Image (cartoon, helix red, strand yellow):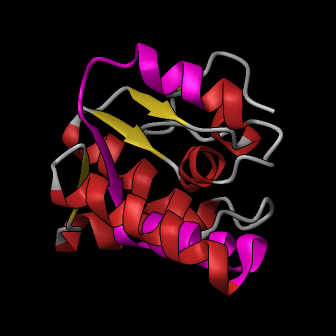
């Protein structure tokens, strides 16, 4: 299973996004299920609505829900420990600042032993698992 941040989800459904093709190519090369958190889905939906507008958002929304319903994108629920860790991480990285979606993804990676994330977010080069190890980023060059 590989974690996915909001950025690639947005890019996959917004053809005008500068990273659209790069994310399509990366997604095609990923052979494990993608997983994300509710905050990352909420961020994705919010940004897609803002970018696409009401008429075009409906298609993107339905395609995104289809990924969830068919199991191609797994929505992970946070445990109490992961929620606490996300709050701790947001305090630790307050100078960036770390947003809620990023915090939940890092907390899950840390507490569930996950090592790779599909993201476009440069901050993931700074975040450290257990204060030591960075996550492996796909695609290899985050913006």
Is-magenta flag for residue 43? yes
The residue that appears at 32% across and 65% down in the rendered structure is: 65
Q: Is residue 6 visible?
A: yes
- By secondary structure, the bulk of the magenta-drawn segment is best described as helix
Furthest residue in direction front, as rendered: 55
Residue 50 in the magenta stretch? The answer is: yes
Q: Residue at x 71, y 46 (%)?
A: 15
> Residue 94 location in percent, x, y?
72, 67
Residue 12 drawn at (x, y percent): 58, 44
Relative to 38, does residue 13 appear above or below in the rendering?
above
Give the residue drawn at x 33%, y 72%: 84
Q: Nearer the viewer, residue 107 or 102?
A: 102
Q: Is residue 88 visible?
A: no
Answer with the quarter of the image where residue 143 lies: top right
| In this rendering, position of residue 37 left or right of residue 136 | left
- Which residue is rendered at x = 40% and y = 60% of the image? 64
State the image coordinates of residue 86 (x, y, percent, origin top left): 43, 66
Q: Is residue 26 above or below residue 84?
A: above
Q: Is 30 positioned to the left or the right of 100 in the image?
A: left
Q: Which residues are magenta?
A: 24-53
Location of the N terminus (image quadrant) = top left
Q: Where on the picture, by quarter, is residue 8?
A: top right
């Amino acid at each position: 299973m590989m974690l996915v941040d909001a950025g690639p989800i947005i890019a996959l459904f917004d053809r005008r996004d500068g990273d659209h093709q790069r994310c399509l190519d990366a997604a095609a090369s990923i052979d494990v299920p993608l997983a994300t958190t509710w905050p990352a889905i909420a961020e994705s939906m919010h940004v897609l609505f803002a970018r696409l507008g009401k008429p075009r958002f409906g298609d993107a929304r339905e395609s995104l829900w289809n990924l969830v319903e068919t199991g191609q994108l797994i929505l992970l629920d946070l445990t109490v420990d992961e929620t606490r860790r996300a709050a701790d991480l947001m305090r630790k990285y307050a100078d960036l600042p770390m947003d809620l979606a990023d915090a939940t993804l890092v907390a899950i990676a840390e507490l569930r032993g996950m090592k790779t994330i599909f993201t476009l977010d440069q901050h993931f080069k700074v975040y450290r698992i257990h204060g030591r190890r960075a996550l492996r980023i796909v695609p290899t060059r985050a913006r």
